[in-house]
Image (spheres, helix red, strand yellow):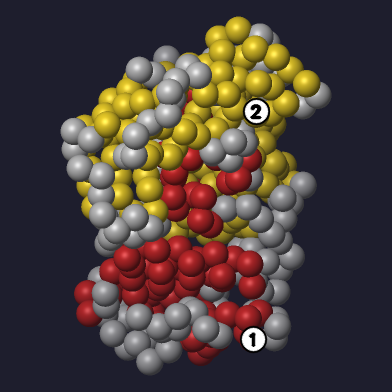
Amino acid sequence: MNKMSSVHSLSQTGTSKKQAASVQFRNVTKRYGNVTAVDDVSFTIEPGQLVTLLGPSGCGKTTTLRMIAGLEMASEGQILIGGRDVTNLSAADRDVSMVFQSYALFPHMSVLENVAYGPSVQGASKKDAHEMAMEKLSLIGLKGLEKRAPSELSGGQQQRVAVARALVLEPQVLLFDEPLSNLDAKLRRRVREDIRELQQSLNLTVAYVTHDQEEALAVSDHIIVMSNARIAQTGTPRELYEEPADLFVADFIGDANIISGDLVSVAGPTAQVNIGNVSLHLPHRNARQGTVKLAVRPDAIFLDDKAAPSGALTGTVRKASYLGTQVEYEVDSAIGNLFVVQYGRKEPIAPGTPVSISFADQRGVAIVPNA
């Protein structure tokens, strides 16, 4: 599969002529009868940023994306694109393009005709529409395939055609609805890198919907985590991973072991938290003394199958899975069942082996406030 290698050079020659626009939701609600699909949601996507709407099925993320597109109308609140109130405008009157999960390519048209369709509908001559389409096909590495039918392309190539078709009208905002869900794992990783490179090189404002946490962490400037029609937390990928606002976010963004600890003292920004006989110093995140919940990432737990020192936290390996670059363990312990990932170990610790357990200090372990 060709890489989008020409993105940077083309972006310098005026390929993206329109200035990136912001997207703003002000207390937006969407109801379907008695069902509230999106409940009093407010956020801003800054110009030139890729922001992902992330959450489980039914959380409201796709409805939110469709309201940006004008495919659904808000029941309450205000939607602005580039500072312009578009709340009551139809999809045709908003300067946005959407890449759908199914790609929605016309099977009876060639690749070139698919991409040129938008400009043609808007009144461009056939010659101009084809020139605009070829420019975008070159941009995403599909030059030479313009005469093929969609059925003659791989899944990744079809996805690129859908992106070219969305880009050809040079929209203020580009929307992606689960764009990689029909691709295999290795291809998903490569295409998401291409989308991110394209977005950054052309300074596009992008709203991106996915339920895949790894995908969201890999491509986003900011992530909006949604749960039950509301926003659970907004932040950078690192903020969400390292400083989850609640147990839902901690458990949803990457794997996390949720365990209890005892916050015994606070000194400045740091708290001493005891897990059994193990003492950690962590950002207190405004937690008070007493029992607290901790989100512990799998790679922040260390196992040692040598003789455990007196008073150490101990457990027993219940399951070990060798995955090439890493070994994943399930460990029974006094603080519960733990999921542990170790990198670089050649020989897995055998199931049934007693182990001592320790934790990374201030890396991969976070107090979860209000838990």
Residue 282 falls left or right of residue 70: right
Where the C terminus falls, by quadrant? top right
What is the x, y in percent for residue 370?
A: 60, 15
Up/down of 47 relative to 65, above or below = below
Which residue, as the protein is rendered here, is positioned at the far right? 268
What's the residue at 77%, 26% (across, down)?
Answer: 269
Per the rendering, the mark at residue 305 is none
**Dividing the picture into quarters, in which one does residue 158 lie?**
bottom left
Q: Give the Cα distance between marks 1 and 2.
A: 48 Å
Q: Count residues near mark 1 (Cα–Cα under 10 Å), then give few for <14, some for 14-19, many for 20+.
A: few
What is the x, y in percent for residue 160?
A: 41, 72
Q: Can I make out residue 32 in this image? A: no
Q: Secondary structure at mark 1?
A: helix
Mark 1 or 2 closer to N-term? 1
Which amino acid type corresponds to the residue marked 2 in the rendered image?
Answer: His
**Dividing the picture into quarters, in which one does residue 150 lie?**
bottom left
Q: Residue beneath label 2, please?
A: 281
Q: Residue beneath label 1, please?
A: 9
Up/down of 153 relative to 185, above or below = below
What is the x, y in percent for residue 187?
A: 33, 67
What is the x, y in percent for residue 294?
A: 52, 24
